[in-house]
Amino acid sequence: MIVSMARRGVLAAALVSLVLTGTTTTATAAAGRDDTLGKELNALVKQHGFPGALGAVRDRSGRTRHFTAGVADVRTKAKVPVDGYVRIASNTKTYVAAVALQLAGEGRIDLDAPVEKYLPKVIRGNGNDGRRITVRMLLNHTSGLPNYTADMPSVLEIRDRYQEPYELLRAGLAHKPLFPPGKGWAYSNTGYVALGLLIQRVTGRPVQEEITNRIIKPLGLKHTYWPGQGERRIREPHPKGYHFAGPGAKPVDVTELDPSWGWAAGQLIARPSDVNRFFLALLDGTLLKPQQLKELKQTVTPENFVPGISYGLGIFKMELSCGGHAWGHGGDIDGYETRNGVTEDGRAVSFAVTALPQPTDQEAQLAGFKAVDRVLCATR
C-alpha cells in the first residue's frame, strides 16, 4: 500500500512472501471514555517494535478522540504529536477511485469500457494490452498488470530520485501479465498509475488537482495534501518515519523522501482525523451518486490475502469479529504504515505506525488489521 502495497506488492505480497526505552500514551479523551485505540497503539509499539504510533477514533455520536504511543524521534525521545501528518501511501488509491467514479457518474468514463478508449496505445507491451483491460479491472485489481514496485530497490537508493508517471508505467509493462484480464486478482500499483493518467486524459488536468478540487476542498480536509513536485518534507507536526534493513537493525530516518514513485498509487499526506472524514464522506454518499456508491461496494474476494477482506473499487471490505463489516484501505510506504476502517453507522478509526513491519513477521503484518477490528467493535 504503497511499499508493502508497493515495492513488496502491498499486503498480499507482504503476507505471502526497534528497540525502545519505554512507551507513553496520551489522549485528548476525558478519563473514563473507551481507550481501546490507545491500548492498541501501545501494543503495536511494545510488541512489534514500531518507534511510534498515532491515531484518531470516532464513535457513532460523532465524538473524536486522539491517541499516541511511543516516540516521534528515536534520538531525542520527543513525544508523538497528536493527530500529526503521515504519508498515507496506498490510501491514495481510494481518492483516485472516488474521482474516477465521479467521472463515471458524469458520463465521462464508462467503467466497463476498455482502457484503450481513454489511453490509446499506452497499455501495450509484453502481452499487456489496454484493449482487453477495462477501467473497472484497474480499479479492483483484476487487470493482471504486473506491479512496477516489485523490482524497486531499497528506499535508501531511491529516496531522492524523482520519477515520472510514464516511467513507472513502463517499469510495470516491462513484465508479462500476471494473468489474463479479469481472470484473477493481484494488487497492482501499475493499474493505479494508469488510472491517474486516464483521469488526466479525460479531464485535461493533473490528477492531484482533480483530487484537490473534487475531494479535499469540498470536504474541508485542511490537513490532507498532495506534495508538490520535488517536495520531500512533511508538514508539521509529524513524527519521524524509520526504515529497518532487517530484524535488529538500527533505524534509519527516512521521513524526507521523494514520493513521486508512488504518484496516483500512493503520494498523499494527511492526518488520521482527515482520513476518517474522507472515508465517512465516501461511504455516506457525500462524494458519490447512489449508482457509483453501489459500484464502489461491489467486491471480489482475493485468494491468499488477508482473511475476511474483499476488495471493491479502490476500497477494502473487512468482516468484523463482532458482526457486520467495515470499509477502508490502508497504506505502506517506507517510514509509515497506516490502517483504517469506517462503518456505515458512522464509526471510524485511522492510525499509523512509524515504520513498516518486517516482511517475514506475519504477526506484525496482520496486527494493524486486527487492531482496526478491535477498535471498531469496542465503539459499537
Image (cartoon, rainbow, N blue to C red):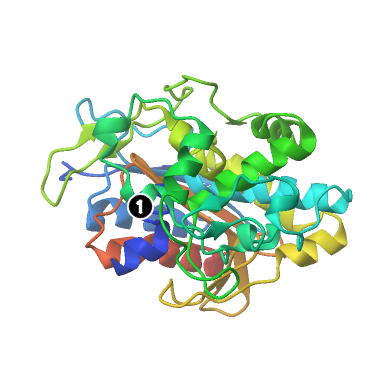
Q: Viewer-proximal residue, 171 or 290?
A: 171
- The residue most toward the top is 230
Quadrant location of the C terminus? bottom right
Residue at figure coordinates x 28%, y 50% from the top left: 45
The answer to whether residue 130 is above or below residue 132 is above
User: In this figure, which residue is indicated by the disc labeled 1?
Assistant: 150
Q: In screen coordinates, is 240 left or right of 227? A: left
Position of 286 with respect to 189 (left or right) is right
Outermost left residue: 248
Q: What is the quadrant of residue 205 in the picture?
A: top right
Residue 336: percent from the left, percent from the top?
A: 38, 42
* Residue 27 visible in the displayed image: no
Q: Which of 286 and 208 is in front in this view?
A: 208
Q: Is mark 1 on a helix, strand or loop?
A: helix
Give the side of residue 175 with respect to residue 144, left or right: left
Q: Where is residue 334 in the image (x, y as percent from the top left)?
A: 34, 41
Above/below status of 232 relative to 300:
above
Q: Classify 10 Å Cα crowding around label 1: few (below 14), some (14-19), many (20 and above).
A: many
Residue for point 58% across, 30% down:
226
How many numbered marks does the figure carry? 1
Q: In this view, does 171 lie to the left or right of 273?
A: left
- Tell me residue 41's x, y (percent): 37, 52
Q: Which amino acid does label 1 sit on?
A: Ala
Taking 355 as reference, is 184 above or below it? below
Q: Position of residue 341 (x, y in %)?
A: 57, 59
Q: Does the image show residue 229?
A: yes
Image height of 40 relative to 333, above or below: below
